[in-house]
């Protein structure tokens, strides 16, 4: 995909759970169905899931990699910063299947939200427009 799209800095695909809470699996399934529409009509709103994406190493280095000061949503933050330097391609044929066991004890991150701490500021985007 990178060869066909020289401006592409990342590719992402669908994420499927083979087990876990029904609500979480249904949410991911609906998200996978809506993804082609979202990427075309609202390209700046969608974000790839941290479970299924690949980033060009030069792009990863250019934006400073993951923001390790964040305690959650590092993948969303990475996606937002990558958009400033290139294109992110969605490819429905790229599918990863993982276990949903992590959601059994922490349904949709509820426990994490209950322990919420103010999010630190993310890495700056000012140097990405070069």
Image (tube, rainbow, N blue to C red):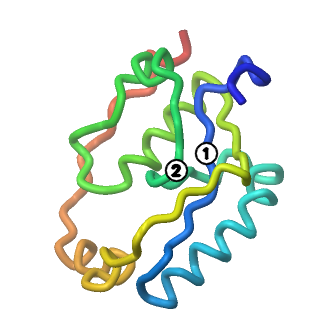
Identified at 72% across, 52% down, the residue is 93
| Sequence order check, earlier mark of 1 and 2 | 1
Q: Secondary structure at mark 1?
A: strand
Identified at 53% across, 43% down, the residue is 53
Badge number at residue 52: 2
Identified at 36% across, 28% down, the residue is 65
Identified at 79% across, 23% down, the residue is 4
User: In x, y percent, where is residue 79?
Assistant: 52, 41
In the rendered image, which quarter contains the N terminus?
top right
Q: Quadrant of residue 95?
A: bottom right
User: In x, y percent, where is residue 97?
Assistant: 52, 64
Q: Is residue 40 left or right of residue 114?
A: right
User: In x, y percent, where is residue 37?
Assistant: 81, 60
Badge number at residue 12: 1
Crowding near the residue tagged with mark 1, few <14, some 14–19, many ≥20 C-alpha atoms within 10 Å = many
When the figure is inspected, residue 19 is found, relative to residue 50, above or below; the finding is below
């Amino acid at each position: 995909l990178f060869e066909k799209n020289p401006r592409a800095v990342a590719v992402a695909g669908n994420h499927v759970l083979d087990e876990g809470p029904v609500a979480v699996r249904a949410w991911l399934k609906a998200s996978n169905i809506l993804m082609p529409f979202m990427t075309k009509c609202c390209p700046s709103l969608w974000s790839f899931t941290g479970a299924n994406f690949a980033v060009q190493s030069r792009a990863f280095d250019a934006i400073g990699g993951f923001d390790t000061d964040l305690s959650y949503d590092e993948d969303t933050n990475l996606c937002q910063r990558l958009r400033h330097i290139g294109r992110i391609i969605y490819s429905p044929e790229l599918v990863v299947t993982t276990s949903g066991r992590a959601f059994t004890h922490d349904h949709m991150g509820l426990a994490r939200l209950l322990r919420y701490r103010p999010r630190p500021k993310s890495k700056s985007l000012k140097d990405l427009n070069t």
